[in-house]
Image: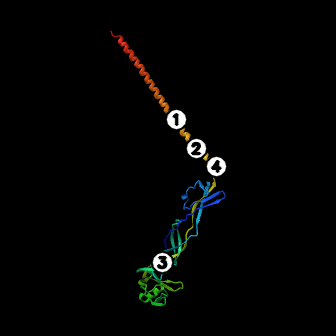
Amino acid sequence: MTAALLWTGKREVQGQESPDGEIIRRYSEIYDRTEELPAPEEYIRDSEGREYRLTKSRIVTSPVTGRQKYLAGEVVYAGVMRSDTIPDTAVMEVYDAESGITFETELPLKETEYENERWESGFPVIVTFHSYGADSYTLGDIRIRHCEERPPLEKCSQEILKAAGLSQEATEIESFAWNGESYCGENGELCRDALASVKRKVWDCRAVYEGKAALPDYDRYRLLNEYEPVAEKNRESCIKEETEEEDSKTVGKAEDGTGIRQVLWYVAGVTASISILLLFFLVVGFKKLRKAAKKADNMQP
């Protein structure tokens, strides 16, 4: 029989930075899963403002071991008698919230409490009569006159309860009958079994188990990042590359502006050409109209 417990642990967070000559090694905070690890910083600065560049990053396992916790739980044993033995230990199923692991641990018995007193019927008890013969037979310390139909309950009830290890205060025999035919026992004597149906006084026993238990070991994870100083030449090279990149962007923008202006000039030139052609056709047409009008005037009488 098991019982479930819940224990919530505290999350541990660590961070560390340790310089080693020109190399800086920096640990990230500790996480439960590798998927939670953040991306490391590409560049950092020390306390004096010097810049360092990331050169290596790897995952480091941080084992969590040696944890202990005082745990407690209870088990209810239903329908037991006062004479019944309650287990000295019990296996408990425990959920450890810190590690996310469910495990089993054995705890010692601390105390018991009996409740819900009642009578329960139908508890079977088998007793054996020895020296079963024509005139009598024995049960424990008493000799009983032979009865073929059934054993005389009124004469042997105390011996039946005694043979079954039951007390008269907490049990009552409801019925009693032979259980099979006679047979030859181990020592060669003739025996016969009888079956009694007993009503018992029972309780529900609430047992409390407590004790210190070892919690399961588990792993957590963090990053170990290594940084090296950024050299002055590298810094100047980076600055030059950034400057050239900005200049190329500026040139690209300027080239883009020149192309637009060229398109605008082209459109303006085409428009001007069309305007000149229209004006030319208008002048030619006007001159033809004037010649036609003069010719018409000369032809009048």
Picture disc at residue 234: 4
**Could you tell me how far apart the alpha carbons at marks 1 and 3 are, in whole angstroms?**
92 Å
Please tell me which residue lies in front, 8 or 247.
247
Q: Secondary structure beneath disc 1?
A: helix
Bin the neighbour count of mark 4 within 10 Å (Cα to Cα): few under 14, some 14-19, many 20 and up.
few
**Could you tell me how far apart the alpha carbons at marks 3 and 4 are, in whole angstroms?**
74 Å
Work out which residue is located at the far top of the displayed protein and give it: 301
Residue identifier under label 3: 207
**Could you tell me how far apart the alpha carbons at marks 3 and 2 are, in whole angstroms?**
78 Å
Picture disc at residue 176: none
Residue identifier under label 2: 245
* Residues at marks 1 and 3 touching, judged by CB atoms closer than 8 Å: no
Horizontal and vertical percent position of residue 299: 35, 10
- Residue sitting at x 59%, y 44%: 243
Indicate the amino acid at tag 1: Gly
**Could you tell me how far apart the alpha carbons at marks 1 and 2 are, in whole angstroms?**
21 Å
Q: Secondary structure beneath disc 2?
A: helix
Indicate the amino acid at tag 2: Glu
Residue identifier under label 1: 259
